[in-house]
Amino acid sequence: MAPVNSNQTFNQQYSQEKYTAVLNQLHSKYPGELDFRVSESPIFLPAYFRDRLLDVCESLVDQILRIPAKELHEAIPSHIHVHEHAGRPDLMCLDFAICQDHEHKLVPALIELQACSTLNYYQYELASAYRTHYEIDPEVTCFFSGFEEETYLERMKKIILHSHDPAEVALIDYKPTKQKTRIDFAATHAHLGLPIVCLTDLKQHGNAVYYQTESEEKKISRIYNRFIFDEIDRLSATQLPIDLERALDLEWVVHPNWFFKISKHTMPKLKHPYAPETYYASDFPSDQNLAEYVLKPLFSFSGQGVILNPRREDLTALPDPSGYILQKKVEFAPTFEDPKGDLAKAEIRVIYSWLRNEDRPKATFNLVRMTKSAMSNVDHNKADKIWTGGSIAFFET
């Protein structure tokens, strides 16, 4: 049987039994933790697309690194007060629609970016599951920058733990056992051994932060930050047991302020042929055709608050237009054919990581969302639609 190195050869090997085996591998390693749809198929992308993708990523990273610190800090909402410290974003994600140009060649189009953690270990497990149950060509890769399985895992260990004992590095989220992404938490724990702790279960004594083990309070030296402020905003002062405004005796991966400083707020400042024109809603030119743009809140998840076809009255109704962007629409290419002949669209996330001894971050790994709906987020994918959900890309080398 020919090795799988394209979407066509994958379909020739596909079977429901193999897809079930992929899911069973994930379920057996992490029982009860998979809470979103997994696509039946990875996607296979040509080398020229990878080169285009990395070209735009590197250009955007260059531009972000040149933005003055004061301008980045202005992105932090006035009611958010987390003590700042010198540092850099350890992890960063750039999301792109997979589109086509006039020659029907695949091109990326930037749709979002964020300095935050993502499904770093789950994606590794997903790629492994696909490779286990399909004869995927060893010459294709889901990594960037020359990374392979061993070097990727070693890098993630350094990113998250730095030089600390895993027992002193806690993965923190709000209600982590209820999060849709909890399978990544379980995979992170399996690989690194660090504890998973709810934000509301932390304890603070002076400037030190602790979590409770069965026998003692354990000091935290470093937080692997997985919480988002959408949820933290809804907590009362009594529910938040640590003082985020205080100079706490710990390190962050990623520091919460970077969630805002590199985000949709940054996008109007970035220019590239593969970065669609973007304006703050407060600065949207009156002569632009609103029908060509999508309205997005600066800080939201899972597509919440997005208006795909905004009207002028939607703009005038905004409580704070500076808290929204208008981004020129991109047309996803229905490129990935399922065995029934139906086509799926996809977006791809390029995951960057940045070690302390490096001058700039490095493209490391990827995440894919496949869809047949107007929005690619996994929450919009229905169980009866095949070739939709979370996936991963393999690239020609």
Image (cartoon, rainbow, N blue to C red):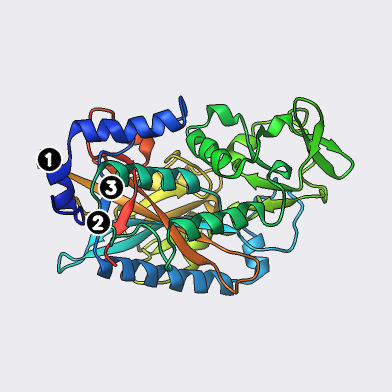
> Where is residue 245 drawn, in percent x and y?
79, 47
Residue at 53% x, 35% y is: 186
Q: Dot 1: what SS? A: loop
Determine contact: label 1, label 3, CB under 8 Å: no
Q: Dot 3: what SS? A: loop
Q: Dot 2: what SS? A: loop
Identify the image quadrant of residue 168: top right
Crowding around mark 2 (Cα neighbors within 10 Å: few <14, some 14 to 19, many 20+) is some
Q: Earlier in the sequence, mark 1 or mark 3?
A: 3
Please give the residue where the numbered disc 1 appears in the rendered image.
339
Identify the image quadrant of residue 90: bottom right
* Residue 57 appearing in the image: yes
- As displayed, is residue 146 above or below residue 227? below
Relative to 36, 343 lies left or right: left
> Where is residue 202 drawn, in percent x and y?
75, 33
Asked whether 385 or 191 is in front, the reply is 191
Asked whether 387 or 165 is in front, the reply is 165
Calculate the distance from the C-alpha at mark 3 to the C-alpha at mark 2: 13 Å
Please give the residue where the numbered disc 2 appears in the rendered image.
137
Q: Residue furthest left?
A: 341
Determine contact: label 2, label 1, CB under 8 Å: no
Calculate the distance from the C-alpha at mark 2 to the C-alpha at mark 1: 20 Å
> Where is residue 62 drawn, in percent x and y?
51, 74
Identify the image quadrant of residue 284: bottom left
Please give the residue where the numbered disc 3 appears in the rendered image.
42
Query: Amino acid type of disc 2?
Result: Asp
Residue at 48% x, 35% y is: 183
Residue at 72% x, 48% y is: 165
Residue at 61% x, 64% y is: 355
